[in-house]
Amino acid sequence: MNAATLAEATLALLLEMAVYVSAGYWGWTRTTRLPLRLALATGAVAVLAEVWGLFGAPTATHPLHGTARVLLELGWYGTGTLALLTARRRRTALRRPPAGTPATK
């Protein structure tokens, strides 16, 4: 394996892990109840891991090629991006005081 192939494989792995982390973070920020937080975080990661294992991994059960592979990767990285964006939006909304609350100094 040459240096370029190794760098490409390393980048692919890091990006895949970033999608899992984003999905877990999304699940964790959906609620304040611990059991539901754990279920959503682990469930989101498990669903994504199953999809990637079936269709996207180098040793996938049903590997996709061509246009189907491109669509899988667009959906994959799009899901990670949307999960992170909606998790951040939710955390920001939880920190804001309700409308009509007087400002404190």
Image (cartoon, rainbow, N blue to C red):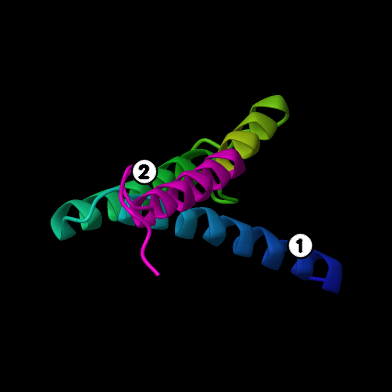
Task: Work out which residue is located at the far bottom of the displayed protein and give it.
Answer: 3
Q: Which amino acid does label 1 sit on?
A: Glu
Residue on which disc 2 sits? 47
The quadrant in which residue 105 appears is bottom left
Q: Give the range drawn in magenta.
A: 77-105
Classify 20 as above or below 82.
below
Measured in 3D between alpha carbons, the distance from the residue under mark 2 to the one under mark 1, in whole angstroms, is 25 Å
Nearest to the observer: residue 25 or residue 99: 99
Residue 26 visible here: yes
Could you say where residue 33 lies in the image, as x and y percent from the top left? 16, 55
Tell how many labels.
2
Residue 23 visible here: no
Q: In which quarter of the image is the N terminus?
A: bottom right
Q: Which residue is drawn at 55% across and 59% down?
A: 18
Q: Which residue is drawn at 46% across and 60% down?
A: 21
Residue on which disc 1 sits? 8
Tag 2: Cα neighbours inside 10 Å, few (<14), some, or many (≥20)? Answer: few
Q: Nearer the viewer, mark 2 or mark 1?
A: 2
Nearest to the observer: residue 85 or residue 42: 85
Could you say where residue 83 lies in the image, as x and y percent from the top left? 48, 45
Classify 77 as above or below 42.
above
